[in-house]
Amino acid sequence: NAGVTQTPKFQVLKTGQSMTLQCAQDMNHNSMYWYRQDPGMGLRLIYYSASEGTTDKGEVPNGYNVSRLNKREFSLRLESAAPSQTSVYFCASSVEGSNQPQHFGDGTRLSIL
Amino acid sequence: AQSVTQPDIHITVSEGASLELRCNYSYGATPYLFWYVQSPGQGLQLLLKYFSGDTLVQGIKGFEAEFKRSQSSFNLRKPSVHWSDAAEYFCAVGAVPGAGSYQLTFGKGTKLSVIP
């Protein structure tokens, strides 16, 4: 009963490097989300996928791309990492769209030097 | 635009004391309101939610919240705090189910410390 699984848990990158954060859920949820959490800022939505095959921008999408690989998996890619992207990234999923309560993973702590 | 304000960045209470965490929201339609808790190094866990019905909502871990439309508030309460309640608490607002909007807006959080 894993829920939402994120990999890796920690990562350090150099400026300009690329990286993909992985997220998988085993709850048969339709909707998946990527957030970033910065000190004193709460959570801000980067991208979401209302259902398999669709993705949409959230509040802070610049510098990121996403792929909804299948119903279970939703990945977040940084093509050219910048220090401003140092953050904790959370993946979440929900039973259906329209803001049903979301289940969160434990986060990926990403540092960009 | 929707927004959530949690006026208290950090609150310290003694174990056994009562707790109230404040949340004010701005939303142009009927809001769907949530409280989440985050323990250090963990993701967010849903405590409770509300969008219709009784304005006093019961959640997990002994928490409750009261929706007051006239005050645009959704404050979280607990009668007697336990040391294990020390964590960060987030209020969030979004569209009601079926409204077609997927944007959840979170407050900046209130960190709760508990004195033994």
Image: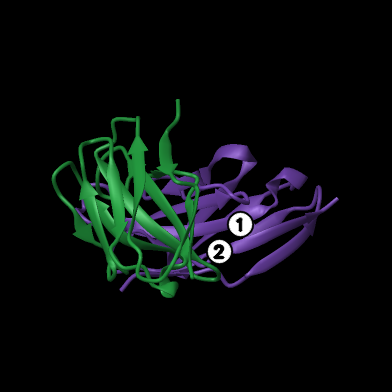
Chain colours: A green, B purple
Crowd rating for badge 2 (residues with CA inside 10 Å; few <14, some 14–19, many 20+): many
Residue A98 in the image, given as x and y percentages of width and height: 26, 49
Q: Quadrant of residue B104?
A: bottom left
**What's the amino acid at mark 1?**
Glu
Q: Is residue A106 left or right of residue A77?
A: right
Q: Which residue is mark 1?
A: B88
Query: To which chain does the residue with label 2 belong?
Result: B
Extreme residue toward the left, this view: A53
Residue B21 in the image, given as x and y percentages of width and height: 62, 60
Extreme residue toward the right, this view: B116
Q: Nearer the viewer, residue B4 or A55?
A: A55
Q: Which residue is mark 2?
A: B109
Extreme residue toward the top, this view: A1
Looking at the image, do the residues carrying marks 2 and 1 touch, with CB atoms under 8 Å apart? Answer: yes
Q: Is residue B97 left or right of residue B80?
A: left
Secondary structure beneath label 1: strand
The structure residue drawn at horizontal position 68% and vertical position 58%, both measured from the top left corner, is B112
The structure residue drawn at horizontal position 44% and vertical position 59%, both measured from the top left corner, is B92
The structure residue drawn at horizontal position 65% and vertical position 53%, both measured from the top left corner, is B87
User: Can residue B85 be seen in this snapshot?
Assistant: yes
Total labels drawn: 2
Secondary structure beneath label 2: loop
